[in-house]
Structures are given as structure tokens and as C-alpha cells.
Amino acid sequence: MSDFRLRVFAAVARHLSFTKAGQELFVSQPAVTKHVRELEAQYNQRLLERRGNRVTLTEAGRLLHAHAEAAAAAQQQLEDQLLGLRDPDEAAGRLRLGASTTLAQYVLPGLLPAFQARYPQVQLSFLNANSERIAEALLRGELDLGFVEGRTKSHDLHYELLLPDELVAVRRTTPGGPPAAPLPLAEALAHPLVLRERGSGTLEILEFALRAQHIKLSALPVAIYLDNTEAIKRYLEAAPTALGFVSRRALDRELAAGLLEIVPIAGLHLARQFEAVSVQGQPLARPAQRFLSFAQAQFKGAR
């Protein structure tokens, strides 16, 4: 998109917020307003309805937004293809990755420096959100490649195994106490529970497992829902009676420091898979292909 005003308008339309659009493009909110008003004057159409803090698109705004996004995608595709002509065996251009929270915090960041060193011409960005939001961003064309956990699959998306994982029950370590003994399921679920938020793959896996035991999450004593694993761990460190469920891969530091301990639960096994996800039927651009192959090679021995 050669017209910066279209980029500004597209950002406002995506976020339905002048403030967030300005933050994305590093321009002031008055500048965002100015660019949108110039477009409205140029087309002699109202593009946005502003009622207090709420922003909605008019019919003309929806039409212009669709055009602006298509133009941006076409321009980016052209730039990626031109860069790829320099060396067909290399990768260059934009790579927009997204990963659900556990993957974004504990699995993928360690790969990024080596990938960037191997492919310095790739312009990398990284979105951390829950599995549901990653899927939505892929379908909206906001990401090139995603990584998620969970059971629900969309027919519009293609999934490939990255590596296996396991959720475990965890609680604060009792100083000087014996290692945690296995608990019966009913006793474990009587504790105040600290869980991930709706839309997370972690909560979905737990719900599926409980449903198989004919247990409804709504019937359990949930103390709090939190939107990331770090928050769950910090909460558990301060709550002696609470029990949380997190990825085993997220516990290395706390287990080594004796802050938290894994609590085996009889009859509850929470295996899951971390998966790469892309839009069904849409070939991956070369940077995304290179990253997926790079990540799968790194984790091949862990499968």
C-alpha cells in the first residue's frame, strides 16, 4: 500500500480503535484522525461511525477496508517473490508467526535467534495469544504460520505435529514435607483450582478429560481463571491450598528451585500435542516453510 493513509485506515478498521492503530504504526492519535478524515474527504464518504469510545465501519468503510487489505497482501506477496528471486534456496521477506501462550513463552523463543542467524533476510514478527485467537488471526490473513495446542480443529486450517506435551497438576511445595503422593481424582478436584482462560488450549484439554469422567467444570471450585502460565505459577506460590494445571515444559525453574511440585492424579492423564497450523489449501510462503522445517528439525528427537 503506497498510500500511508490507507495503512492507517486499515489499522483502525482492524482494531476498531484510533489509539491501537496509532500504537501499531507509531503515530499519534491526532495523526490517525487526520489521515482518516483526509480519506473521507477524498471519497466523499463517511468511513467510520464514532460514538463515544466505540468505532464501527460504515458500508463504505467495509468496502475500503477489504480493498486496503487485499492491496497490502498483493504488495507483500510481490515483495516476497522479488526477494526470493535473489536466491531460490534462501528465505527472505516478511514472516508473521503466532503461537499460543505455552508455546510462545516456553517452546519457540529459544529457536528464534538461531533461525534469524540462519535467515537474516527474514523480517520476523511474533504474536502471543491463546489458541482460539491464533486460529482467528490465521483465517483473517494476519499471520503466515501459527502454533497451537488443544483438541478443537477447524476444517479451514491445516495442522502438523510439532512435538508432544503433557499437562500436570501442580501446587506449592510444602517446606520440609515429603514428595507429593498421588491423589484420587475427587480429592484433587476439591482443591481451589487455578485455570487458564476460556479459549486456551490448556483449558480445553482439561475440559475434554473431565468430560470423559462425566465431570463438569462448572461444578468445580475454580478459584480464578488467568490468561497465562506465569500468572498461574505465581498465584500457586502464594496459595498453599490451590491446585493448578500447566504444561510440564513450563515448570523447569520452579521444580529445580523447590517452589512448586507436581501432584500425580489417579485416573487423569492430560497428554496433548503442540501443532503447527496454517490456512487449508494455501501454500506456505518460503519464510514460513523454512521456519516450519527448522522448528520440526529442532524438535525431532523430542517426539
Image (spheres, rainbow, N blue to C red):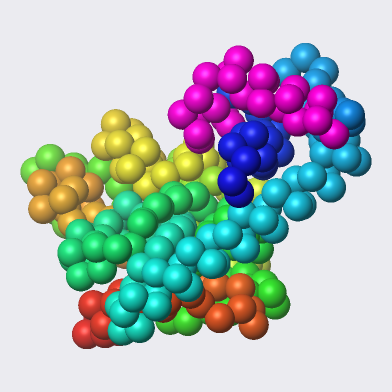
> In this figure, what is the number of numbered marks?
0
Using the image as rendered, state which of residue 297 and residue 226 is in the foreground.
Answer: 297
Horizontal side of residue 9 vs 107, given as left or right: right
x, y percent for residue 99: 44, 59
Q: Say which quadrant the C terminus sits in.
A: bottom left
Using the image as rendered, state which of residue 218 and residue 133 is in the foreground.
Answer: 133
The residue under the point 62% across, 24% down is 32
Horizontal side of residue 298 vs 66, given as left or right: left
Quick check: 206 above or below 274?
Answer: above
x, y percent for residue 122: 33, 63
x, y percent for residue 123: 36, 57
Q: Is residue 108 visible?
A: yes
Instruction: Examine the structure image and report whether residue 37 is included in the region drawn in magenta.
Output: yes
Quick check: 155 above or below 173?
Answer: below
The magenta-colored residue range is 20-43
Majority secondary structure of magenta residues: helix
The residue under the point 50% across, 35% down is 24
Using the image as rendered, state which of residue 23 and residue 32 is in the foreground.
Answer: 32
The residue under the point 76% across, 52% down is 66
Quick check: 250 above or below 193?
Answer: below
Horizontal side of residue 186 vs 113, given as left or right: right
Q: Is residue 276 visible?
A: no
Instruction: Examine the structure image and report whether residue 120 is included in the region drawn in magenta.
Output: no
Quick check: 231 above or below 266?
Answer: above
x, y percent for residue 115: 24, 67
Horizontal side of residue 153 vs 264, given as left or right: right
